[in-house]
Amino acid sequence: MSFRPLTARTPAALLREAKPLKTLFGEAQRLDHLQHLLDAQLPPAAREHCRLASWRDGTLLLIVSDGNWATRLRYQQRRLQQSLQKLPEFSALTRIAFKVAPVAGSARPARQTPELSSQAAESLRSAAEGIADPRLRAALERLARNAHTDEKEH
């Protein structure tokens, strides 16, 4: 008994023939079309922060990248709903719901503290010596103690 692999088919043929893939592809195309219509009604700055998640039973669910944009869009919700209802695809729109879900990979990078060279630390120490204000002097001395230790050793 020998194994005979199935003949390869093009992706386009698979999408036309396989019913689950065809349905999925059709829904993806529909959502993409609705996203373009939504983008045309959104303020330009909001377009990259707002994605259409679903449209069913008169409710449009929008995924917003952060709470700030969700708040801004909620303030504009009535205007957005009225402008979308003028389009045949959204004529049955009765409600717009917002869900905040940060875009993957958009997490803020960890804050890096700048490294202080030993030369800068020495400048801070000498400046602190000439300061009469004890709080300012202590602050400068604390900053000077944060000098990069590897540079001191070289």
Image (spheres, rainbow, N blue to C red):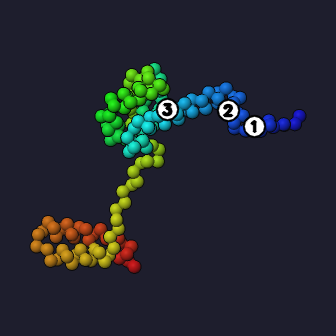
Packing grade of label 3 (10 A; few <14, some 14-19, many >=20) is some
- Report which quarter residue 59 is drawn in: top left
Q: Are marks 3 and 2 in contact (CB under 8 Å)?
A: no
Which mark is drawn over residue 104? none
Tag 3 secondary structure: helix
Q: Are marks 1 and 3 in contact (CB under 8 Å)?
A: no
Mark whose residue sits in front, 1 or 3: 3
Determine the CA span between mark 1 and mark 3.
30 Å
Q: Is residue 59 visible?
A: no
**Residue at position x 44%, y 23% in the image:** 91
In the drawing, does residue 146 fall left or right of residue 14? left
**Residue at position x 23%, y 67% in the image:** 142
Which amino acid type corresponds to the residue marked 1 in the rendered image?
A: Arg
Residue underneath mark 2: 15
Which one is earlier in the sequence, the residue at label 1 or at label 2? 1
Determine the CA span between mark 1 and mark 2.
10 Å
Q: Is residue 83 or residue 113 the one in the foreground?
A: 83
Which amino acid type corresponds to the residue marked 3 in the rendered image?
A: Leu
Tag 1 secondary structure: loop
Tag 2 secondary structure: helix
Residue underneath mark 1: 9
